Every structure is written in structure tokens, then in C-alpha cells.
Image (cartoon, rainbow, N blue to C red):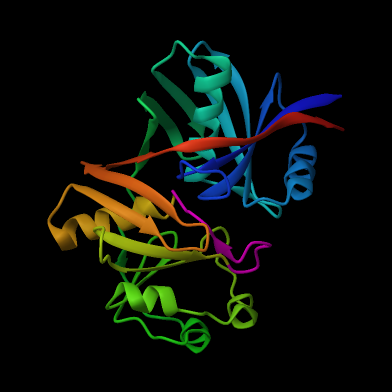
Amino acid sequence: MTIEIFQIDAFTDKVFGGNSAAVCPLKAWLPDAHLQKIALENNLAETAFFVRESSNTYHLRWFTPEIEMDLCGHATLATAMVIFNYFEPAEKAIHFHTHSGTLSVTKQGNLFEMDFPSRPPIRANLPLIIKEALNIQPVEVWKSRDYLLVYNSEEDIRNLAPDQSIINQINLDPGGIIVTSRGATVDFVSRFFTPQASIFEDPVTGSAHCTLVPFWSQRLEKKNMDALQLSNRKGQLFCSLKGDRVFIKGKAVLYLRGEITI
């Protein structure tokens, strides 16, 4: 059988930037083992699979090369871009049924706005193994799904070089390690590292902003914030906090469209 595949660069307006995700439309769900093998073969941070349920409602799932994820921002943005541009061009809003509840995405010009759950962090202690892996130590430690390590400056975030061999000894399934600080030209910056993953540093992590946005909203006393993720590919996110929901806007561009055969 053949399955259509799109590869989208999310949170960027240029190919080779942002974070790449594969998007595979399905007529019906394949066995989970097949979905996992496709994601492994794609070898991207995430592969998104969706099945249409009604005119603007879809069932959406995300797989890394290793596991199924409970939430993935950049692959949701990529999926929305594919649906809006190639399947439902007349729609202005679409809804995804996911492991994290119903997620809605609206099209606003050349931006796509995602409505995600807020995951505010609580104070935490830094595990010794993470401390040993860091060349620069954080000034604060918080935790939600992911550890959130707060630093003094954007320069610290740029210069951080965690020891992957040590980090890979940690099991945070399905979480990771966010590092963040106030930004020099934006409200806040971040990077994201995933233990035991084929892609150690995620280029742009939408789901991490479900924690970053409520954290920085309280710290900066702002509801609307601009953010940069400082990976090599970089990504720009426009964020807002409304009650217990995080809204994240971003751009996305098509890199590849084709078919896979299984």
C-alpha cells in the first residue's frame, strides 16, 4: 500500500529552518507497530499521523523514532499546515482529538495558532546526574512534564553544552530538559534536550512552551510574549496565556511531498 507523506519545516518561514516533521494522512488507522516503523524509517523528531473524522475534525497521533508522544507542538503545526493547504483550504479552524485532549488550530494569514493545555511547573530539585552533565549550572530548577532549568542570560543558553553521554543515562520518558532565560531581543529564549532520543537537541519544541509560557507569563507579568528557540535551526514562536490554555502561533513551509510504500 502507499501512503502520502509531507515533510514540513515548522516555526519558520524558510526551508531548512525550524523543526521538521513528517505528516502522513491515513484513511484508517494502521497497527501501532506499523506507525512506529514508519516513524523510525523517517528518522525525524516526530511523524504525525491523522485520520479525518468530519469536515474539520481529525484524530491525531505523534511518534518519535522510539515512542508515541502525548503532545507535540511542531508536528501539530505541521499537520495543520498540510490540512489547511492541501485538504481543507476553505476552513479557518480545525480540531484534533489527541492523547492530550482536543487541540484546535486556527489559520490567521500566514500564521497558524494552536490552542494547547497549560502545564505550569513547580519548584524542584536538580538531580545530581543532570547537574553533572551541565557545563553551566542553572540558577533555578522547576518541573512539569519536563525539567525547566532557568539561567541568567541568553548567552548562558547559547553556550550550554550538556554531556549527551550522561544525559542519556536518565529516563524521563516522555519528557526532556528545557533550558531557558530572558531574551536579548525577545521575551524569553530556550533550548530542549531529550535523553535517549535519536535527536538529542530538538530544534523547536512547541510542547515545551506549554510550560515556558505560564512560567514566563508570571515572571514577566505579561500575557503575550515572543520567544526564540536557540537550536542551530532556530525557531520563532508567538505565545499568549489565556486562563489554563497556551496559544502558540508560528509559520510553516513545505519541504517535501511524496508517497511511501509499505
Nearer the observer, 87 or 60: 87
On the image, the x and y values in percent for residue 203 come to: 52, 57
Q: Quadrant of the C terminus?
A: top right
Q: Is residue 242 visible?
A: yes
In the rendering, at what x and y percent does residue 243 appear? 21, 41
| Residue 124 vertical placement versus 234 (above, below) | below
Is residue 124 at least partly visible in the picture?
no
**Res 93 quadrant in image:** top left
User: Is 204 part of what is drawn in magenta?
Assistant: yes
Quadrant hosting residue 191: bottom left
Give me the residue at 46% from left, 57% from top.
Answer: 234
- Residue 98, given in percent of the width and then of the height, sits at 51, 34
**Residue 42 is covered by the magenta coloring:** no
Q: Quadrant of the N terminus?
A: top right
Q: Is residue 77 above or below residue 229?
A: above
The image position of residue 82, as x and y in percent, is 56, 27
Majority secondary structure of magenta residues: loop
- Compared across the picture, whether 187 is left or right of 37 comes to left
Residue visible at 71% across and 21% down?
A: 28
Which contiguous range is marked in magenta? 195-206
